[in-house]
């Protein structure tokens, strides 16, 4: 049944629960998956896996900044419109 429902949009959090840009993330669990919801700097809502794929750090404790949620362990950033992490390293 869960496999079927994953094909459709599911309401998981109310917009009022994410009131301000760069505010505190919200823990969400649906269909056995632990997720983190957040509102980025532009006001867009993001929903990502609760654990960073790099070291498994809990993204609930991440820094919500610069249009994304940044992992506190190594600085990978997860943006609201895509779930591509990238290290926070300077070039050169």
Image: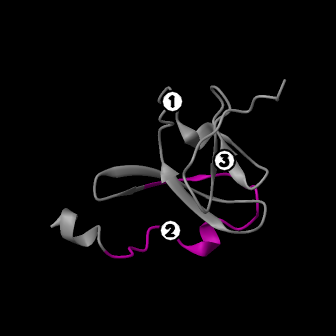
Percent of width and height locating residue 57: 52, 30
Labelled disc at residue 13? 2
Q: CA distance from mark 2 to mark 1?
A: 26 Å
- Give the side of residue 49 with respect to residue 76, left or right: left
Percent of width and height locating residue 30: 35, 59
Taking 11 as reference, is 29 above or below it? Answer: above
* Mark positioned earlier in the residue sequence (2 or 1): 2
Mark 2 vs 3: CB contact within 8 A:
no
Q: Nearer the viewer, mark 2 or mark 3?
A: 3
Q: Quadrant of residue 3?
A: bottom left
- Return the residue at label 3: 69
Q: Quadrant of residue 46?
A: bottom right
Which residue is rendered at x = 63% and y = 73% of the image?
16
Which residue is rendered at x = 74% and y = 56% of the image?
67
Range of the magenta residues? Answer: 8-28
Q: Nearer the viewer, mark 3 or mark 1?
A: 1
Asked if residue 47 is among those painted magenta in the image, a careful observer would answer: no
Asked if residue 16 is among those painted magenta in the image, a careful observer would answer: yes
Mark 2 vs 1: CB contact within 8 A:
no
Tag 3's secondary structure? strand
Which residue is rendered at x = 47% and y = 30% of the image?
56
Percent of width and height locating residue 5: 25, 71
Secondary structure that dominates the magenta span: loop
Which residue is rendered at x = 82% and y = 29% of the image?
91
Q: Nearer the viewer, mark 2 or mark 1?
A: 1
Q: CA distance from mark 3 to mark 1?
A: 14 Å
Labelled disc at residue 54? 1
């Amino acid at each position: 049944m869960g496999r079927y429902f994953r094909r459709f949009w599911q309401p998981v959090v109310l917009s009022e629960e994410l009131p301000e840009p760069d505010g505190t993330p919200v823990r969400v669990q649906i269909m056995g998956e632990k997720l983190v919801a957040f509102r980025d700097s532009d006001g867009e809502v993001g929903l990502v896996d609760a654990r960073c794929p790099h070291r498994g750090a809990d993204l609930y404790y991440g820094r919500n900044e610069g249009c994304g949620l940044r992992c506190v362990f190594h600085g990978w950033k997860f943006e609201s419109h895509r779930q591509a992490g990238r290290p926070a390293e300077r070039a050169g």
